[in-house]
């Protein structure tokens, strides 16, 4: 029997990669966020992939066989399988838990959940953070399901075959109308020119054919708190959607206190 169990991890942030490892998800999250000399600080998001999943593009069997440290009693921490066009070659059915890692290395596992019921948002503009393989901050009148569908099959210039994204629970209309946006040219969203919020809202209101507006080319995930993510995370493709629900702050406080304290 092998000394250490092998795992496949799909890293979604800060980079896209498929990695084989002999570390548990919790140890892998800690190692990749604060224990590796190649990644000094910042959030990490990854998903465990079924160890039996195979795709010819990824050559998984070859790299799994090489996932050994060569030192008795020492696990192989990371063996990179592929660092390019990974997500598009992963079957959603092979995804297990999604893991959110804080800047201090605490790891929270999320299970697949039923996607929230689609409701009429009344024209509300939502704020989506694309995470993998794109990393744009996007304002849109589309609900999350339609947004994923739009990115993966209805737009060529701004799309991708598959997308992993989340939603920030912020009210753009209130932000635009608040003094916080206007004062001193500073805004409530880091890495975002506050004028872009006003422009995005104006364009989406005036041009009903426009479904999305890019707010920032810079990924905001590292400078935004996990606290503003609701209701969760989506994987989307032209023919499938997988959702992972983000616990509420109350649930995190009661059930995942160690992680909650390190937000």
Image (cartoon, grey):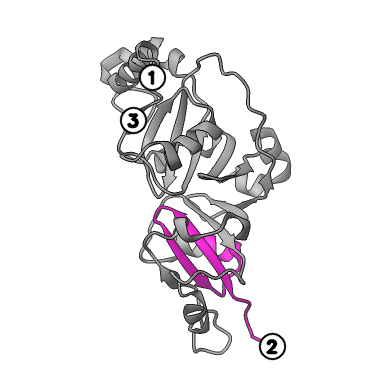
Instruction: Tell me the mark number nearer the camera, choosing from 1 and 3.
Output: 1
What residue lies at 38% left-to-right and 42% top-to-bottom?
159
Image position of 137 (left or right of 22): left
Question: Gap in Å between the C-alphas at discs 1 and 2?
Answer: 60 Å
Q: Quadrant of the N terminus?
A: bottom right
Q: Does dot 3 land on a helix, a strand or a loop?
A: strand
How much space separates mark 3 and mark 2, taking CA atoms? 51 Å
**x%, y% of residue 38?**
35, 64
Q: Which residues are magenta?
A: 1-29
Q: Is residue 238 above or below residue 200?
A: below
Residue 42 position in % (x across, y down): 42, 50
Is there any visible trace of residue 150 in the rendered image? yes
Q: Which residue is mark 2?
A: 1
Q: Is residue 38 left or right of residue 92?
A: left
Q: Disc 2 on helix, strand or loop?
A: loop
Query: Which is more N-terminal, label 3 or label 1?
Result: 1
Identity of the residue drawn at 36% across and 62% down = 84
């Amino acid at each position: 029997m092998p000394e250490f169990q092998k795992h496949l991890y799909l890293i979604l942030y800060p980079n896209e990669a498929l990695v084989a490892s002999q570390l548990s998800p919790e140890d892998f999250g800690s190692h990749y966020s604060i224990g590796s000399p190649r990644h000094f600080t910042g959030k990490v998001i990854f998903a465990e992939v079924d160890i039996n999943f195979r795709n010819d593009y990824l050559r998984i069997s070859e790299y799994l066989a090489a996932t050994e440290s060569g030192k008795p009693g020492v696990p192989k921490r990371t063996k990179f399988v592929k660092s390019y066009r990974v997500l598009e070659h992963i079957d959603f059915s092979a995804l297990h838990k999604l893991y959110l890692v804080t800047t201090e290395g605490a790891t929270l596992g999320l299970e697949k959940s039923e996607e929230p019921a689609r409701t009429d948002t009344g024209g509300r503009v939502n704020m989506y953070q694309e995470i993998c393989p794109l990393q744009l901050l996007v304002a849109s009148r589309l609900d999350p399901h339609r947004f994923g569908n739009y990115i993966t099959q209805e737009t060529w210039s701004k799309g991708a075959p598959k997308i992993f994204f989340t939603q920030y629970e912020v009210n753009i209309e209130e932000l635009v109308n608040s003094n916080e946006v206007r004062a001193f040219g500073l805004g409530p969203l880091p890495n975002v020119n506050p004028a872009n919020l006003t422009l995005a809202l104006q364009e989406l209101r005036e041009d009903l054919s426009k479904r999305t507006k890019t707010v920032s080319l810079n990924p905001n995930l590292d400078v935004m708190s996990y606290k503003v993510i609701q209701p969760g995370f989506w994987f989307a493709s032209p023919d499938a959607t997988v959702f992972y629900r983000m616990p509420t702050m109350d649930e995190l406080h009661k059930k995942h206190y160690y992680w909650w304290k390190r937000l």
